[in-house]
Amino acid sequence: MGAPLFQVDAFASGPFTGNPAAVCLLDAPGDPAWMQAVAAEMNLSETAFVHALDGEAGRFGLRWFTPTVEVDLCGHATLASAHVLWETRRLSAEVSARFETRSGVLIANRAGDEVALDFPADPVVAAEPEPDLLEAIGLREAVASTGRIGWLLEVADARVVRDARPDFARLAGFDIAVLTARADDAAYDFVSRCFGPKFGIDEDPVTGSAHCALGPYWAERLGKTELTGYQASARGGVVQVRVDGDRTVLGGRAVTVSRGELV
C-alpha cells in the first residue's frame, strides 16, 4: 500500500481558497531525493512529509519541500499537516501536535474550528533596499528590512501591494521578498504579498512563515500584539497573529480537498 497523500487548503475560508499544500504521511523518515521528486510532482508551493516519532503521543517529524528545494520553515503546510493528523484520527483532537523540524519544535493546537501554530518570531532589522530589487517588483521606494524570511518591504498604500506586478525573472536573483502596507479595510491590520521565484514559487498564496516577521513588525508599529493580516494574492487568505515575546502564534482554518495515495 502506498503512502497516504492529501491536498489541503490552509488559511482558507473554504475549499479552493487560501494556500494549497500536499501532506504525505510516512511510516518512517523518507529519502530526501524521493521527497523532492514527490514535491516536484505535486507542483504546489509546499509538500509536507510527516512521520510519527517514538515516545509520547503527538510527536512527529516534519519536513517541507517546494518543487525545487527543501525549506527550513513553512506555516501553511504545518497547519495542513496538523489538520490531516486530527482529521484522520492519527492524533486525538484534544492532543497537541509537536513537530520536530529544521526550525526546532513547532506546536499546533486545535482552537475551535481553527489551528493555532506556535512558531519562532522572525524580527527584522532595517536595511538599505537594493535598487534592482525594488525595480524587479516595480517599486520606486519602500521601507526595507531583512530577517530570516528575506526582504520585508513596506509601502505607503495597500493598493500598491495589490497592484504590484513583479518581473519574476529579475526577482529570481533575490531571496524571498514580502511586500506589505497598512490595511485599507477595517477588517485587517495589514496586507501583504510574498514572492519567491528563487525557490520555485513566483507568488505564494498565503505564507505563514512570513507572518512570523510581519507580526512583530506591525505589532511594533501599531502598538498591539494581536493582529489580523490579509495576504492579497489571487486566492487570498487571512492569518490571525499573536506576538508573544520570541514566539508568534498563527491562526487559520484548513479544509481537505482531495485524498489519495502514492503508488
Image (cartoon, helix red, strand yellow):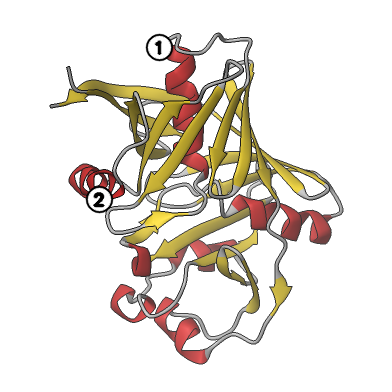
Residue 248 locus on image (x, y percent) = 71, 44
Note whether 42 is above or below 196 in the view shown: above
Say which residue appears at 78% left-offset and 50% top-offset: 246
For mark 2, what is the residue?
33
Between marks 2 and 1 in the image, the one whose residue lies nearer the viewer: 2
Residue drawn at 50 percent across, 81 percent down: 139
Q: Which mark is residue 88?
A: 1
User: Does the CB distance between marks 2 and 1 fall below 8 Å?
Assistant: no
Badge 1 amino acid: Thr
**Which residue ends up furthest to the right in the rendered image?**
223
* Left or right: 189, with 73 as reference point: right
Left or right? Give the position of 72 relative to 67.
right
Q: Can you say whether 21 is above or below 96 in the image?
A: below
Name the residue furthest left: 263
Q: Which mark is residue 146?
A: none
Residue 249 or residue 36, whichever sits in front: 36
Relative to 138, 222 lies left or right: right
How crowded pointer 2 is (Cα within 10 Å; few <14, some 14-19, many 20+) is rated as few
Q: Residue furthest front?
A: 54
Indicate which disc, 2 or 1, sits on the residue closer to the N terminus: 2
**Image coords of residue 11 (percent x, y):** 50, 35
Asked whether 192 or 103 is in front, the reply is 103
Provide the secondary structure element on which disc 1 rests: loop
Above or below, 86 relative to 202: above
**Residue 262 on image: x %, y %:** 18, 28
Amino acid on which the number 2 mark rests in the picture: Ala
x 87%, y 53%: residue: 223
Q: Which image quadrant: the N terminus?
A: top left
Local packing at callout 1 (Cα closer than 10 Å; few below 14, some 14-19, many 20+) is few
Residue, x 49% and y 83% (percent of image)?
Answer: 134
Measure the alpha-carbon separation of dots 2 and 1: 27 Å
